[in-house]
Amino acid sequence: MHLRNVALALRSLTAIHSSNKPAIAFAFHPKQHQHRRMTLHSTAVEPSLTSATSTHANPLLRSWSTEPFHLPPFKSIEPRHFEPAFEIAMDAHLKDLESIANSKQEDFESILAAYDRAGATLSKVYSVYGNYVSSLNTPEMQLVQTKMAPLLSRHTSKTYNVPGLFEKISKMNEVRDDMVKSGEWTEEMGRLAERVYIKFVRMGALLGEEEKKEYADIQAELATLQTNFMQNVLKDEEEWELILTAADFEGCPPDIIAAARKAAIDRNKTQEDAHVITLGRSMVEPFLSYSTRRDLRQKVFEAFAKRGELNPERDNKKIAIEILRLRKRQAELHGKKTFAEYQLEDTMAQTPEAANKLLMDVWTKSKVAADKEREMMEAFLKESGECLESGIQPWDWRFYAEKVRLANFNFDENEMKPYFSLDAVTDAVFDVSNKLYGLKYVKRPDIVAYHPDVNVYEVRHDTADGEEELVAIFLHDNYARPYKSSGAWMSEYRTQTKNLIPGSDPIESIPIVSNNNNFAKGSDDTLLSFDDGVTLFHEMGHGHHGMLSDCTYEYLASTSVLKDFVELPSQLMEHWLSEPEVLKKHAKHHKTGEILPDELIKKFKAAELFNEGFATIEYTSCALFDIAIHSLTEYSDDFDMAKFEEDYLKEMGMPQGIIMRHRPPHFLHFFASSSYAAGYYVYMWAQVLDNDVFAAFKETGDVFDKDTAERCRKLIYSAGNTVAPQDLFRQFRGRDPEVKFMLENRGLI
């Protein structure tokens, strides 16, 4: 997420993200039940399973030892393989847990270490499944997903209710402090005992039998509703299109026109001059910024803003209300008044009030900035003799912001694009990764992934004796395409661990990390906007979190941190792209090889904070709305989502000409998963942390300072959840975080 454009935070979704394995959109972990990526779904008839039920015939269940680095056998996997593989893997997982529960052994290795290893087959199957439904979600995969969503939810509920298991987990938690103090357990072992116990409690382990059954029913129903919600957004994005000719793109730069032509070809438009605008953000926002056709801007914007409600038969508002009611009941079963109260209990913020305090401070300052920006645009309109009777509308803001940027700062972002080819920005992020953390990326074109667009790399590191060692396998999937979820995210096919099943190949401890973007593929070189480049750097920050993980137990490894810490590693990485040292080395013209001119860098820096009020309002309104709607104590039969949205934004004083970046009917972070529900504030919370951490680099006078980078690697990227995040930050900075660095960098003070 762009440190100066927090609105881009919603890369995913499940972005990084998930709650223990966040977002950062995430895959399922059988021990934690994290959805690290919001997945896409559809309804239809069941696919045929045929011989896929055979373990020998099913590539998901066979040993992957014949594949390079034990990668999934991508060439052999078909959608029909998932359901039977899940059936066998879920059964094996339950048997693992029953074995722990029934064991007479009461030691750490027999209980918690074994728990950490349990469900290995299910982890493998779901890692592929989660990535496919995000990156290769064909109609056949959607059928599988629709059926599996409630079944996987039911399985998760069973894993927290295996007779005798919670009792053993509780005993481990009861003795953890004494065992750590005595030296019999490491600090990490104690942390594992604590985190596993907390997860069991949050999954209802302390509830009565009837309440447990109700809780499981709620979880299963939520899984189905969230599946339907995301499916509806996907369908709107798949079906809506605006067919134009090249002449309709007046004012648009060549790369936008080329991307629209490529989209027309991809959608099988046979007209010679057909160009298609889709509802992908990477196409919509540039069109809104440069098209001189106000009527077309309005048409595109309104369709984009109404995703999830474009078809009356797929109205996500009704689904969202039912999700809210179920979450409210879920919170009540935990003794909480609201879902927001329940959700934030296990975060750094801990309470909705703490999260709101930060958001409101930023909201107040950003409203002042946004009003000034609108005044500048109105002054531009007056000077140029233009008149907008209705005033600046949401489909006008980006267009006139670019006009003011050019008039006041003599800066046109399109001047930057030729210097930001995808290849150049990829080289830049690899170089920064190497300078900071010593990582080397060796491309393996011989390894076939799940799609031809995906590049596979070995990630290596020099050891103390001068030898190179394998650190991770990295998959880079950068282009938008049909059946791929929008946004950007990091996920994993294998999470780092040292707690291997006895007899395992050591390669199984090496993480397999995937970064996914949605850049519009051009006809020649793919050119990125600066914000696109920031997105690529952001996801590499999540990638580092997975690749540099150095934990004993998978449950605590990689991105398995508290939700409001998980965006720190990603947002921190963004800072380096705008550093002059990086720009001067890597921002090269894609045709001439010319280095980005100093004068253009100077203009870029001068204009960098312009329109930051708009971007901050777009994001912060979503985060505030998220907490507000999840803080309600009742959702009546006549609850009107659209009216609540309108009334709330009016009460908050939403600046004229701006709407929420993600409205409720398509807000996947809210309603396609519970991971970021009542938690969208985390991007701003993490911005306080990442700006403070980057300030530590700046204070040394060298943004690549070796000592600071090593502390950053050890305490932020490698530690996972082995230590409480607030303690990790204090160890790095020597104090608690200060908000001033974030406010300064956003131009709000």
Image (cartoon, rainbow, N blue to C red):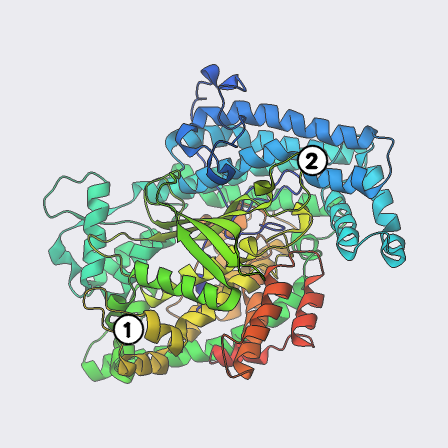
Q: Is residue 689 above or below residue 307?
A: below
Give the total of numbered labels.
2
Image coords of residue 152 (percent x, y): 59, 32
Circle 1 packing at 10 Å, graded few (<14), some (14-19), many (20+), is many
**What secondary structure is marked by label 2?**
loop
Is residue 301 visible to the viewer in this orientation of the structure? no
**What secondary structure is marked by label 1?**
helix
Residue 748, labelled with which disc?
none
Please report the residue visible at 29 percent of the width from the left and 53 percent of the height from the top. 520
Please report the residue visible at 65 percent of the width from the left and 59 percent of the height from the top. 719
Left or right relative to 411: residue 339: right
The answer to which image quadrant residue 716 occupies is bottom right
Is residue 715 visible to the viewer in this orientation of the structure? yes
Name the residue carrying label 1: 402
Image coords of residue 321 (percent x, y): 55, 45
Q: Which mark lies nearer to you, 2 or 1? A: 2
Image coords of residue 561 (percent x, y): 64, 55
Work out how far the residue at label 2 is from the one at label 1, CA to CA, in angstroms.
60 Å
- Give the amino acid type for the residue marked by disc 1 in the picture: Glu
| Image marks 2 and 1: residues in contact by CB distance under 8 Å | no
The answer to which image quadrant residue 579 occupies is bottom left
Left or right relative to 215: residue 123: left
Name the residue carrying label 2: 502
Q: Is residue 298 above or below residue 707?
A: above
